[in-house]
Image (spheres, coloured by chain):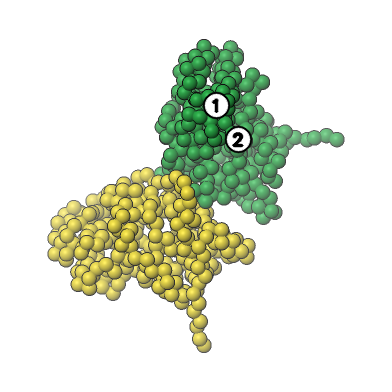
Chain colours: A yellow, B green
Amino acid sequence: MTTTTMTAPIVTTRDALRAQVAGWKAAGARVGVVPTMGALHDGHLSLVRMAKSACDRVIVTIFVNPKQFNNPEDLEKYPRTERDDAAKLAPFGVDAIYVPTPDQIYPDGFATTVSVAGLDTMLCGAHRPGHFDGVATVVSKLFLQTGADQAFFGEKDYQQLQIVRRMAGDLDLPTQVIACPTVREASGLAMSSRNRRLSPGGAERAAMLYPVLRGMADALSQGAGFSGLVPQATEQLQAAGFDEIEYLELRAASGLAQMEHADRPARVFFAGWIEGVRLIDNVPAGPA
Amino acid sequence: MTTTTMTAPIVTTRDALRAQVAGWKAAGARVGVVPTMGALHDGHLSLVRMAKSACDRVIVTIFVNPKQFNNPEDLEKYPRTERDDAAKLAPFGVDAIYVPTPDQIYPDGFATTVSVAGLDTMLCGAHRPGHFDGVATVVSKLFLQTGADQAFFGEKDYQQLQIVRRMAGDLDLPTQVIACPTVREASGLAMSSRNRRLSPGGAERAAMLYPVLRGMADALSQGAGFSGLVPQATEQLQAAGFDEIEYLELRAASGLAQMEHADRPARVFFAGWIEGVRLIDNVPAGPA
C-alpha cells in the first residue's frame, strides 16, 4: 500500500477562501484553522495533526503580520519560507493553505484595532508594545475570513493563547480556541522559528532553559515560594548564556495574575535573550 | 381584508437568537438588523421599514450600551421604554426583538475593545472620550450575535455610521452597513430620543438648527468658504437658545477630513446644547 502526499492548494484571497469554506460547510464539514507566520517546524506540525484529528477540513494560514512586530528589524529577519512550508504540510492532507496578500488583510485605509485589556500589559506585553493588539486584530480577521469552527494554538505562546481565547469569546467569534502542548527538541528546547537564528552551540546552551524551568516547577509543587527560587535560576540561565532576562515570573494559568505559591494552576514564564535572539518558554506548575 | 399586527417575539439570549437565525438562514432568508438603544421614534421606524424592504427577516436589537456613555448621568437619564418599543414595532412585522440581558453582551471578565483610528478623534469623538470604542465594540458583537447580512444605520449619527462601516469592513464581519437618511419632525428637527427631554418651547427653538445648516449648505454649494459662514450661523443658533456649540464643521463625507470649500461630497456637522440637552445634526453639502 502506498501513501500519496499532495501539496495542498494555496489560496491567496479572502473571497476564494470563503467560497471554498462555504462548500465544505454546506457538506456539513467541521473546519479547523492553524494560524501561522510560516517558517513551519514540528511545533506547528503538531498543531496541524491536532486539527486534522478534530476537524474534517483544515486550513493552515501563513501570514507574517507586520502589526505584531514592534521591532522592524525583527520583522525583517523573520524567515519567509513558503515553498518549504507547503512541502512540509504535504504529508498531512491539509485542505488549503491560505497565504493572503497583505491587501487581503490590511486593505487601503484599514483603521481598526482589537485589544484585550488586562492580559496584554504584563510578560511579553510589557516588552513588546502593541504586539498583542496586532495579534488580536489579525487573529480576529483570520477567524472571520476562514469561518473556522476551531483554531489551534500552542501553549508555547501561552499569553497569546489566553488573549486570543478571551478575544474570541468576548467578540462572539464563531471559532473555538484549542490549546495544544508545547513541542520540544530532544534537548528540551521549545520549538520556535527563532531557534534557526541560534548557532549550534547557542541552541545547546539555550536548551538549559527547560530543565531550569522544570526544576522551579518541581520546587513549587513541593511548596517552595517563587521569589526564593529566582536567584539560583537566574544564575543558571546567565551561566548558560542568557545575557538578558526580560522576565521570569509565576502567574496564574487562567488570568495571568502574579503568584508566589503554586497553590492553584499556574505557569512559570520566561523571556530572555541569547546570541541576540529573544526566546520565550513556559511550564505548568502546581495543581493541573 | 384585515391586517393583523402581532408583537414580535422578544429574545433575550444570544444562543436563542442564534438558533432562530440559523433556522431562517437554512431556509435561505436574508437577515437584516436594526441596532437601537430603544426609546424608538419615527427615525428608528424608518430604519425598520428599510430593513423590511431589503431583507426577508428583520431583527431589532434594544440594548442601552453602558460602554458608549462617557457621562454616567447621560446613561442614567437615557429613556428605557421596552414595552412601548415592542408596541411601536408591532405594525412592521419584525421577526424578533433582541433585548439581551447585560451578561449576554458583557460576560464576566469581558476585556476586549474594538477601536477605529482616525475617524474617532474629531467631532463627537473629541467631546465624548471612549464613546466610539463603545459603539464599535457593541456593534461588532451585535453583528456577530445576529449574523445579519445587512445592518441599517441612520445618517443622523453620521460619524457613527462611518466608523461602523469601516469597522465591519476591516474586521471582515459578515454584515453590510446600509446608510438611511435622517428622519425629521415636521419642524425640521432631526428625530432623536433626546428630544423628549426638551420643553415644547425648547423643541421649537431647536428646530432652527435645520434651516441654519441648510442655509450653510446652500451657500457652500454656491462657492462660499465655510469659515466665512460660521459667525452668522453661530449667532443664529445662540439666538435660538443653543447656549453651547460643541462643533460646527465642514468635513468630507467619506473619511471626515476637515474642508473649507464643498468641492467634493461633504457634510456640515453640528453638536450643541439647548436646555441642558446635547443635540447633533448634519446635512450634505457640495456635490452628491
Residue A19: numbered disc? none
> Residue under mark 2: which chain is it in?
B
- Depth check, front residue: B208 or B143: B208
In terms of image quadrants, where is residue A250? bottom left
In terms of image quadrants, where is residue B50? top right
Mark closest to the chain's N terminus, 2 or 1: 1
The image position of residue B86, as x and y in percent, is 65, 33
- Depth check, front residue: A141 or A150: A141
Q: Amino acid at mark 2?
A: Ala
Label 1 crowd (10 A; few <14 / some 14-19 / many >=20)? few
Label 2 crowd (10 A; few <14 / some 14-19 / many >=20)? few
Residue A85 vs A179, above or below: the answer is below
Q: Quadrant of the C terminus of chain A?
A: bottom left
Left or right of residue A141: residue A279: left
Residue most extreme to the front: B223
Residue at (49, 35) in percent of width and height: B256
| Secondary element at tag 2 | loop
Left or right of residue B28: residue A259: left
For label 1, the residue is B223
> Gap in Å between the C-alphas at discs 2 and 1?
15 Å
Count the numbered circles shown: 2
